[in-house]
């Protein structure tokens, strides 16, 4: 049985540079494990024998190191990693602190900027990838620059998780709604 969320992170993945803050496991576990099992079937192996980087690409983005069937490290999809259609992803900490204490935003407004109204929605006014891709096809250079930046950050996070697995991978798996976009996945593959 797969629960909605799991905490299988290795102890070495938890500490941050501040003892008061520890990294937490928050990922799209159901989809990640299901995609891992599907690939295992295609490879005619058991998931417990494989090492993969699995990226769930949706309103939030989870990129994880899946080793022997366990999610041993993952970007917390609300606080870390690539920005997504609705989330801000990893932010520069010092600048974020300045913004939080600027007096321009309430606590609730800042939380919404980070998760719910961040990412593509903040940059382009929409989180709808189909609409953004239509804008790109019509020559919207700003939409293309932001969408490419998201693909770049996803690819960078995939590389980081490959390092967690010592670059010994059976595969890289893209899953979730945005994985159906040839434009986005093509840029990630580049």
Image (spheres, helix red, strand yellow):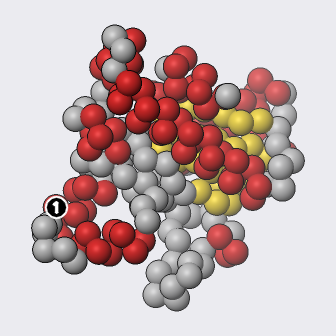
Q: Could you tell me which residue is drawn at 52 percent across and 63 percent down?
A: 25
Q: Is residue 57 left or right of residue 122?
A: right
Determine the secondary structure under disc 1.
helix
Residue 184 spot, x, y in % from top left: 52, 26
The quarter of the picture where residue 171 lies is top right
Are there few (<14), some (14-19), or many (20+) residues within 10 Å of tag 1?
few
Residue 114 spot, x, y in % from top left: 31, 57
144 and 55: which is toward the camera? 144
Q: Is residue 141 visible?
A: yes
Q: Is residue 38 visible?
A: no
Question: What residue sits right under mark 1 in the picture?
Answer: 109
Residue 87 spot, x, y in % from top left: 35, 49
61 and 2: which is toward the camera? 61
Q: Is residue 90 above or below residue 62?
A: below
The quarter of the picture where residue 54 lies is top right
Q: Is residue 9 above or below residue 112?
A: below
Q: Is residue 116 above or below residue 141?
A: below
Q: Could you tell me which residue is drawn at 68 percent across and 54 percent down?
A: 160
The quarter of the picture where residue 138 lies is top left
Q: Could you tell me which residue is drawn at 14 percent across and 66 percent down?
A: 105
Extreme residue in the top direction: 138
């Amino acid at each position: 049985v797969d629960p909605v969320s799991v905490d299988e992170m290795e102890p070495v993945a938890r500490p941050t540079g501040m003892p008061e803050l520890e990294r937490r496991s928050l990922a799209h576990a159901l989809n990640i494990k299901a995609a891992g099992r599907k690939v295992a079937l295609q490879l005619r192996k058991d998931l417990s024998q494989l090492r993969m980087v699995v990226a769930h690409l949706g309103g939030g983005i989870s990129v994880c190191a899946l080793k022997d069937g366990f999610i041993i490290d993952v970007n917390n999809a609300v606080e870390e990693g690539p920005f997504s259609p609705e989330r801000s992803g990893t932010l520069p900490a010092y600048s974020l602190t300045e913004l939080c204490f600027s007096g321009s935003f309430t606590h609730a407004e800042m939380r919404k900027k980070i998760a719910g109204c961040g990412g593509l929605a903040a940059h382009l006014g929409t989180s709808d990838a189909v609409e953004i891709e239509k804008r790109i096809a019509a020559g919207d250079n700003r939409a293309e620059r932001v969408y490419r930046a998201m693909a770049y950050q996803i690819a960078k996070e995939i590389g980081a998780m490959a390092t967690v697995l010592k670059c010994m991978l059976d595969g890289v798996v893209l899953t979730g709604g945005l994985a159906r976009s040839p434009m986005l996945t093509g840029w990630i593959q580049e």
